[in-house]
Structure formats: C-alpha cells, structure tokens
Image (cartoon, rainbow, N blue to C red):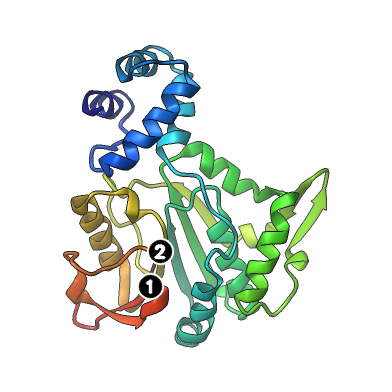
Amino acid sequence: MRLLIDAIYLKYHFDFRSYASASLKRRLTAAMGRFGCDTLSQLQDKVLHDAAVFPALLDYLTVQVSEMFRDPDYFRSLRREVVPLLRTYPSLKIWVAGCSTGEEVYSLAILLREEGLLARTLIYATDINPQALQRAETGIYDLDRIALFTTNHQKSGARNSLSDYYTAAYGRAVFDKSLREHIVFSDHSLATDSVFAEVHLVSCRNVLIYFDRALQDRALTLFRDALCRKGFLGLGAKESLRFSACADDFDELVREDRIFQKKASA
C-alpha cells in the first residue's frame, strides 16, 4: 500500500502518506474491485499508466459522505453560541475545510442568511478533490435527499423553510445562486498547503478522523493560525483537540458539539 501511495504522490502530487492506514486500506480494497484488480500492484500499474483511472480513484481516497445540516445540534449551537459574537464583526470570513460536495458549506450559507450575516460574509470552501469541488459549485443535489436535508434544517433552529433556498426540477434540487455568490470554492490540501487567509470560523467536520496523529496536528495548527483572535473552530462528533499539539490553544465553547474558541493568548 505504501508503494502505491508514494507513487500517487510522486506522479500526481496528492499526498495521502499521512492518512490513517486502516481507512486507506478499506478504500483501496473497494477501489480494487471497481477497477478489476486482484492486487494493489495491479491497481498501482493502472494508476500510473492510465490517466483516466486516477480521477476515479480519487473519489475512493477522499470520502464523499455528507448531508446538509448534518448533526443539527452543531448548527443549533452555532446559532446560539457563535452567531451572537460573529455579529460584532463588520465583515466575516469563514473556512469550510474538506468541503467535499458542498452540503456543509451550503448549510452554513443558509444559516448565515437566516441570521442576517451572509451579506457581509465570504466563505472559503476547500477540498483536494477537483471533481467534488465541481459538484459543490453547482449546488445541485438529488431531490430524494431533500427530505433528510429539510428535517435536519428544521432541527437546526431554522427560521425559514429549506424550500425557500432551492428550485426543484427533473429530480434535482438547485440551490439559489445568491448563496454561491458568497462562496469561493478552491483547491487546498491540509497535508501540503499553508494558511491562505485570516478567518473568524473554521468548520472542518469528519475529516480529521481519516488522518494519522501527525497530520491531525498539522491541520489543527493550520486552523489555529488561520483563526483571528478568539475565533471559532468546529470539529466532527468523533473528533477532539484532546492530546493534539494545539490542545492548550483553545477553550471548549460547546463540548458536546465540538465547538472550540481560540484563546486570546494563542
């Protein structure tokens, strides 16, 4: 497996060398079936010699599982504990790291509109998967997912109906382009890239669980350095700052929903 990951890094410059090995093994095993390979060596040969294979393999190596307003209590806590402090800033920048196909970033855009903050907000939505970023930028989702999205939205403390933000046609829901006008979709790797802006909130949920400890520390250091004084960090339900290199740089704001606030001294 290591030879394949190294080969991908050397040929395509996508760095999975510090991803959690158990998770990588599961995903590569699934990819072997997809590409008709019996061994990782066969898969490596296809990846190195067939340019069409790697983009498809990237969908296996980067997890594309998300939903709008996933874990609604997280968004309810953002409304209750974070939004009142965000209101004190004349303009806002937010970073959704590992945005995948965009469900999280549209959820935040809708929340900010409902709280009267979107007009003065710029959201950076980043991921390493260019296909996922393209899908995110369209703002188009299958209509059969909307029922779940609507339930989550209501549980998050919604002030409007989710249907106010999309148009349905031909089995798809297209989210309002006025939401996208406040979002910048961009390629960014937490494994190799640096901080690109100062932001007031970083939301990176269910991404760190796929990294080993060293890469988790690297990503959390990027988030700390990107955040303004007393800025906010939201992590996934199974993620924590505990035992990380940045543990002492944050206070727990909402422990149960993994929302942290950068210390003034950090």
* In contact (CB < 8 Å): disc 1 and disc 2: yes
Type of residue at label 2?
Gly
| Residue at the image point whose x is 38% and y is 73% from the top | 258
| Residue at the image point whose x is 81% and y is 53% from the top | 168
Q: Quadrant of the N terminus?
A: top left
Question: Looking at the picture, how far across and down is residue 36, in whole percent?
Answer: 47, 15
Q: Which residue is mark 1?
A: 258
- For mark 1, does the 10 Å Cα neighbourhood hold few (<14), some (14 to 19), or many (20 or more) residues? many
Question: Looking at the picture, how far across and down is residue 169, in whole percent?
Answer: 83, 48
* For residue 35, above or below residue 69: above
Secondary element type, mark 2:
loop
In the picture, residue 29 is in which quadrant?
top left
* For residue 154, above or below residue 83: above
Type of residue at label 1?
Arg
* For residue 36, above or below residue 77: above
Secondary element type, mark 1:
loop
Nearer to the camera, 130 or 36: 36
In the picture, residue 40 is in which quadrant?
top left
| Residue at the image point whose x is 35% and y is 13% from the top | 42
Sooner in the amino-acid sequence: mark 1 or mark 2: 2
Q: Which residue is mark 2?
A: 236
Q: Residue furthest right?
A: 169
